[in-house]
């Protein structure tokens, strides 16, 4: 149920066309809630049929123009209700963790290469997040007073930074552990 809420959030921040939304998902929202372009366009149609959003009037002819959407009061109410609701944490479903579990049964041949690849990916993501933090949020101790919205956005970003740091630490440890152990002797 979170994709419609991610879209409502993005549209409340700024009315956008479907194309603009997909770019925003690629650049920011997608860091913590990913969606394909097709999923976004399908969900825009559902939200419009549900009366949560509407296409803004345009002076351009209908054919070939980008439809820009805005959130209606019912959409704002839906989002506010979702924000104040309860939802249990979701269990982690990561194929790498399942591979590690399988390696305990069949051996670790090839696993260190995959761990190194994941480590590089998480290091790149961590660098991207810290670049965003440097660009978009004043360092602590600066005189700038952050708005509540900015503080909440920064908290989301800091959660991403902390998660990526933890992945980097864990993958480094996992590489050390798998490098120290033999892949498995024949016949094991």
Image (cartoon, helix red, strand yellow):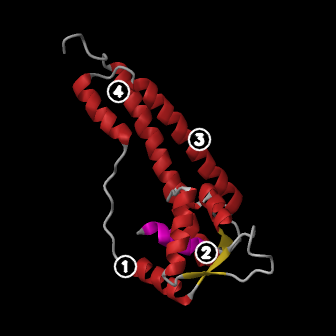
The outermost residue toward the bottom is: 73
- Which residue is at a point 33% across and 39% down the rendered structure image? 97
* Of the image marks 1 and 2, the number of the one nearer the N terminus: 2
**What is the distance, in whole Å, between disc 1 and disc 2 at their CAs?**
20 Å
Which circle, 4 or 3, is nearer the viewer?
3
Q: Is residue 13 left or right of residue 115?
A: right
Determine the secondary structure under disc 1: loop
Residue 85, disc: 1
* Of the image marks 1 and 4, the number of the one nearer the N terminus: 1
Task: Say if 170 sits above or below 132 in the image.
Answer: above
**What is the distance, in whole Å, between disc 1 and disc 4 at their CAs?**
42 Å
What are the residue bounds of the magenta stretch? Answer: 2-10
- Which residue is at a point 48% across and 52% down the rendered structure image? 162
Residue linked to disc 4: 177
Give how far across and how far down residue 143 sits, in percent: 71, 71
Residue 151, disc: none
Q: Residues within 10 Å of mark 1 (few under 14, many from 20)?
A: few
Residue linked to disc 2: 11
Which circle, 1 or 2, is nearer the viewer?
2
Q: Is residue 105 left or right of residue 32?
A: left
Q: Is residue 105 left or right of residue 131?
A: left
Q: Residues within 10 Å of mark 4 (few under 14, many from 20)?
A: few
């Amino acid at each position: 149920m979170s994709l419609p809420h991610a879209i409502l959030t993005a549209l409340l921040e700024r009315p956008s066309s479907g194309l603009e939304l997909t770019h925003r998902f690629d650049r920011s929202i997608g860091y913590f809630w990913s969606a394909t372009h097709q999923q976004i366009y399908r969900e825009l149609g559902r939200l419009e049929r549900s009366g949560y959003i509407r296409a803004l009037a345009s002076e351009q002819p209908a054919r070939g123009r980008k439809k820009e959407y805005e959130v209606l009061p019912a959409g704002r109410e839906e989002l506010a209700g979702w924000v104040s609701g309860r939802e249990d944490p979701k269990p982690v479903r990561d194929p790498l963790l399942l591979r590690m579990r399988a390696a305990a049964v069949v051996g670790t041949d090839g696993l260190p290469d995959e761990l190194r690849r994941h480590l590089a990916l998480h290091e790149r993501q961590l660098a991207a997040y810290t670049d965003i933090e440097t660009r978009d949020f004043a360092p602590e101790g600066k005189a700038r007073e952050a708005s509540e919205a900015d503080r909440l956005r920064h908290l989301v970003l800091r959660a991403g930074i902390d998660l990526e740091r933890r992945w980097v630490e864990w993958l480094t440890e996992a590489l050390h552990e798998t490098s120290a152990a033999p892949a498995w002797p024949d016949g094991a």
